[in-house]
Amino acid sequence: MKVFADNIPNLPWQEKPADAIGPVWRYSENPVIDRNPLPGVTRIFNSAVLPWEDGFIGVFRGEQTNGVPHIYLGRSKDGIHWEYEPEKIPFVNEKGEPFMPRYAYDPRLVKVEDTYYIIWCTDFYGAALGMAKTKDFKHFVRLENPFLPFNRNGVLFPRKLNGNFALLSRPSDSGHTPFGDVFISESPDLTFWGKHRHVMTRGYNQWWQALKIGGGAAPIETEEGWLLFYHGVTGTCNGYVYSMGACILDHEEPSKVRYRSENFILTPEKWYEERGFVPNVVFPVSALCDAETGRIAIYYGAADSYVGMAFTTVDEIVSYVKANHTDNADDAEIGVM
Ligand code: BMA
C-alpha cells in the first residue's frame, strides 16, 4: 500500500514473532526507557520521536523528582538508546525571552514543511494545549496556545490540508476527564483556529474505549486515508485502563472516519504496562513509518513509568482495521451540528 511519507531506512525494527497475537507486536527488549533515566528525572514516558540528521531526536515527558513533568530533548543513533540534554527544553517567546510552561506533559513532535512543532499539555489556567516550534532543536519558540482550557492530546497533521494546519484535540475537564471525543480544527497561521469538527466518538459498543479516546501519534498518510493510532480508555472498579486503537480518517475530509477497528490493537499485558506509577496504561504518542517498506515503529508510554516500542506494517494494520471495522455513532459524518 502506498504511503506518502519519507523513507526511514534506519527505522528501528523487529520481525513479527510467530506467536504474535493481533496486528501489532512489542519489541522484545521493552521497555526501551527505564526508570531514573537522567539526574532529577524519575520517569520518562509518553514521548515522541522523529528522524534527525543521521539518527533520531525526541521530546520526552520527564517526571522530575519533585513530581512536576517537563519536556526534555534526547538524541539517538538507533531510535532505541537515548542520550538526554540534562536541562528541560528552554522555551522562549517570539521576542526570545524565557517563557517556560509551569508544567508540560505528553509532548507530540510533528514536522510540517521545514519546521518541527511540539504540542503538549500545558497549564493555561488549567490543562490546555501548548505549542512551540523549532528548526534546529536549539531554539524553541512558543506559539500562542491554540485553544481555551480544558484540552489535551493535541496532534498536528504532518502537512497542511487545503492550505491550513490541522490539529486533532480532545476537549477535557480540569481533572482526570471521565469523558471525551476527538475533534479537529484548522488554522492558516497556527494562531487563529476554527472550522472545528467532531472526528470520532468514544466507543459505543467497545468497552475498551467506552469512556474516552484521544489522538496519539501524528497521522500517517496512506492511499486509504490517514492512519491514526490513538488511545481508548475504559473505567473499572480499580481505575482507568488505557489501550491502543487504530482508525483511518478520510484523506480529503479527515473529520470523517472511514474505518475504525472494533478491537484494541494493544492493551496492558506486560509487567511494564500493568505495573508502575499508574498501572494499566498503554499510551501511543509517536509512530514512524518507512515509506519504502511500510514498516511502522510505535513509541508508547507504559504505566506512566516507561517507554515501550511496538511494530507493525502499513499493509498489516490497514487490512486489520478494515477487516475489523465497526460503525460508531456519527463517526462517518463530517461532524458539524
Ligand atoms: C492521562 C494523561 C496521560 C497519562 C494518563 C494515565 O490523563 O495525563 O499523561 O498517561 O492519564 O495516567
Image (tube, grey):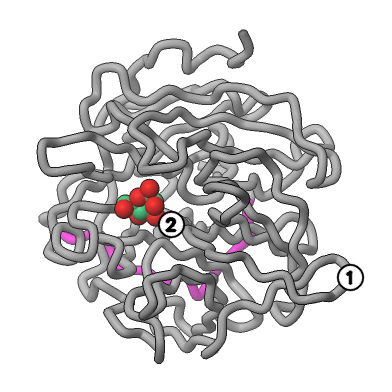
Residue kind at label 1, given as amino acid type: Lys
Neighbours of disc 1 within 10 Å: few (<14), some (14-19), many (20+):
few
> Percent position (x, y) of residue 36?
31, 84
Residue 216 in picture, x, y percent from top left = 46, 47
Among the 4 quarters of the image, the one containing residue 308: bottom left
- Whether residue 337 appears in magenta in the rendering, the answer is no
Left or right of 217 on screen, residue 164 = right
Distance Cα–Cα, label 1 vs label 2: 38 Å
Q: Do we see residue 289 in this rendering?
A: yes
Magenta stretch, main secondary structure, is loop
SS of the residue under disc 1: loop
Asked which quadrant contains residue 69, the reply is: bottom left
| Residue 95's disc number | 1
Residue 274, horizontal then vertical, whole percent: 15, 58
Q: Which mark is residue 296?
A: 2
Horizontally, is 280 left or right of 122 in the view?
left
Image coords of residue 268 (percent x, y): 18, 52
Front one among 37 and 164? 37
Camera-side residue of 11 and 334: 334
Say if 334 sits above or below 217 in the image.
Answer: above
Q: Residue placed at 75% from the left, 42% from the top?
A: 165
Q: Residue at x 67, y 78 (%)?
A: 90
Q: Which residues are magenta?
A: 5-17
Q: Is residue 3 visible?
A: no
